[in-house]
Amino acid sequence: MEKLPKPTAHYYSETDTMMIRLADRPGVEAEEVAEDVILTYDADDKVVAIEILNGVAALFNELIQAVQRGDKIGWQG
């Protein structure tokens, strides 16, 4: 079984964006998959990075408040 690297996340306060690296492989193509969410793919078409634009601080602030209130958090789709 392939051992997966630990993801790394970097927040850039000057632009309020976050880059989450999922692999050390270089990206060759990027695609905006939702408003302000960009996925970067490697040569094998596997996601190597997720970039979240505009409003990251507000998103995490809402998440923290929900956790503090004890809200159940889940993905809806």
Image (cartoon, grey):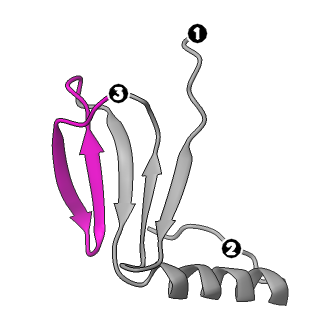
**Real-space Cα separation, disc 1 to disc 3, in angstroms:** 18 Å
Question: Residue drawn at (58%, 9%), measured in percent from left and top?
Answer: 1
Q: Quadrant of residue 47?
A: top left
Q: How many marks?
A: 3
29 part of magenta stretch:
yes
Q: Are marks 1 and 3 in contact (CB under 8 Å)?
A: no
- In the image, residue 47 sits, relative to residue 3, either above or below, namely below
Q: Where is mark 2, residue-wise?
A: 73
Look at label 1 and name its amino acid: Met
Q: Where is mark 3, residue-wise?
A: 25
- In the image, residue 16 sits, relative to residue 65, either above or below, namely above
For numbered disc 2, what is the local secondary structure? loop
Look at label 3 and name its amino acid: Arg
- In the image, residue 77 sits, relative to residue 4, either above or below, namely below
Look at label 2 and name its amino acid: Ile
For numbered disc 3, what is the local secondary structure? loop
**For this rendering, which residue is in front, 23 or 77?**
23
Q: Are marks 2 and 1 in contact (CB under 8 Å)?
A: no
**Real-space Cα separation, disc 3 to disc 2, in angstroms:** 31 Å
Which image quarter is the C terminus in?
A: bottom left
Q: Are marks 3 and 2 in contact (CB under 8 Å)?
A: no
Q: Where is mark 1, residue-wise?
A: 1
